[in-house]
Structures are given as structure tokens and as C-alpha cells.
Image (spheres, coloured by chain):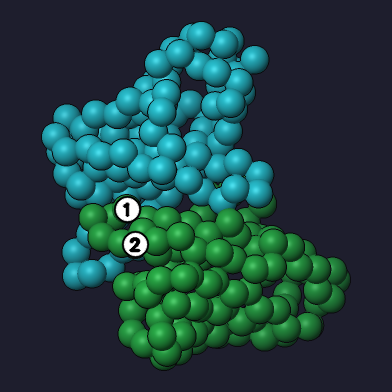
Amino acid sequence: NAGVTQTPKFQVLKTGQSMTLQCAQDMNHEYMSWYRQDPGMGLRLIHYSVGAGITDQGEVPNGYNVSRSTTEDFPLRLLSAAPSQTSVYFCASSPGTGGIYEQYFGPGTRLTVT
Amino acid sequence: GQQVMQIPQYQHVQEGEDFTTYCNSSTTLSNIQWYKQRPGGHPVFLIQLVKSGEVKKQKRLTFQFGEAKKNSSLHITATQTTDVGTYFCANSGGYQKVTFGTGTKLQVIP
């Protein structure tokens, strides 16, 4: 199993550009989430999904869109990049069974917006 | 998940010394999870606690969940350089909406 994979690893965008961060998991997990990590701020939840076709907002959803057409994939779209979106983005998945909320994280995407 | 505050933000210890990080909430938590993130890496799940007063051990790591389920701690005995990283507590309020604490960054001086 590859676990949770994310692409790209690094990305530089200009203000106003759009892009999609890819996330895929091969563990058949129902739950998937996107977080951003900024120095001193911990991990903040952007969007999450409890299954294919179902998504919901987290703490900091503005400027981001998600969709979940399959169990495996959960892409994150930046609509119009802003310098405030410079961050490290982590995708995570969780089996969501038996009351265990263990999250498996991908390696992250380091995004810089200039 | 509910808001969780974590202290301290940073901790420097001499190798061999003990280390403790604390996670506090103003409301009752249904569960608490702990993660470790090595420098440049991604968070890795360590453990989940769900019962009042629960104590779990993993080698030199001891995890506690308070009696009132409003606080938790992670204690490392006799730190090693391999313990370096940031430790996060997290809470799931249901439907996998997990809220993370701000983390404690541990530096171990050899």
C-alpha cells in the first residue's frame, strides 16, 4: 500500500493563479481531510469528507474548494491564490470505524504564493 | 472537535531529562489523540484515549486523559535525540472533524 499520496511536493504560484492539490489514498478509507500548517498555528482543518459525494467545511474553508467523486481521491482547489495561502498542506485519511479516529497523513505540499 | 490549548509551545531538554506536554480544554472532550511530527515530516498518530482517567504507555511515553476529560498529558521519560519533533494533541468531535492543538516543539540537547 502506498498509503496517502500528495502531489505536487512543492509549488510556487503567482497571486491570482488557480491550481489543484492532488490527494489519493489506497486504504479504502471513508474519511478524508485537508489541513494547512502555518508556524505557531498547528494544523487547521480546511475541508473534510465522510464519504464519496459528501464534503463539509472545516475551520478555514475560504478560498478553497473540494469534491469527492471517488473514495480514493480528494483534490483541493485554490480558486485565486493569495499570499495568505502560503503554507504547507496536508491531506489525511481515516478508516472511521470502531470509534477510532486515527488519521494517516500524506507527505504534504509546500505552497508559496508570491 | 472542540478547541484544545497546548502548553508549552517550546521545550528544550538535555538528553536523559524528562519531558511533559499538556493539552487543555474548557469543555469535555469525547476523545484525545496524540501525534508526533518530525522536522520536515508529516504528523504520525501515536495513540487515542477515550475513557476518563485513562493511562496508556508506549515504551518511554506515558499518555493520560484527565478524570473530567478536559485535559490530557504526554510524558516522555529519559528523552533521546530521536524524540525531537513537535507533539500535537487532537480531538474529534464526530464525523472526523478533528481539531488539533498548536503543538509543543521538543528539542533534545545531546
Q: Are marks 2 and 1 in contact (CB under 8 Å)?
A: yes
The mark that comes first in sequence, 2 or 1, is 2
Query: In front: A54, or B76?
Result: A54
Mark 2 burial class by Cα count in 10 Å: few <14, some 14-19, many 20+? many
Spot the green chain and give its letter. Answer: B
Q: Position of residue A12 (x, y in %)?
A: 59, 18
User: Is any part of residue B58 visible from this angle?
Assistant: no
Q: From the viewer's perspective, is residue B15 above or below residue B33?
A: below
Q: Position of residue B89 (x, y in %)?
A: 50, 66
Residue at figure coordinates x 55%, y 79% from the top left = B73
Q: Which residue is mark 2?
A: B92
Mark 1 burial class by Cα count in 10 Å: few <14, some 14-19, many 20+? many
Q: Which residue is mark 1?
A: B97
Q: From the viewer's perspective, is residue B73 above or below residue A81?
A: below
SS category of the residue bearing label 1:
loop
Q: Position of residue B86 (x, y in %)?
A: 63, 60
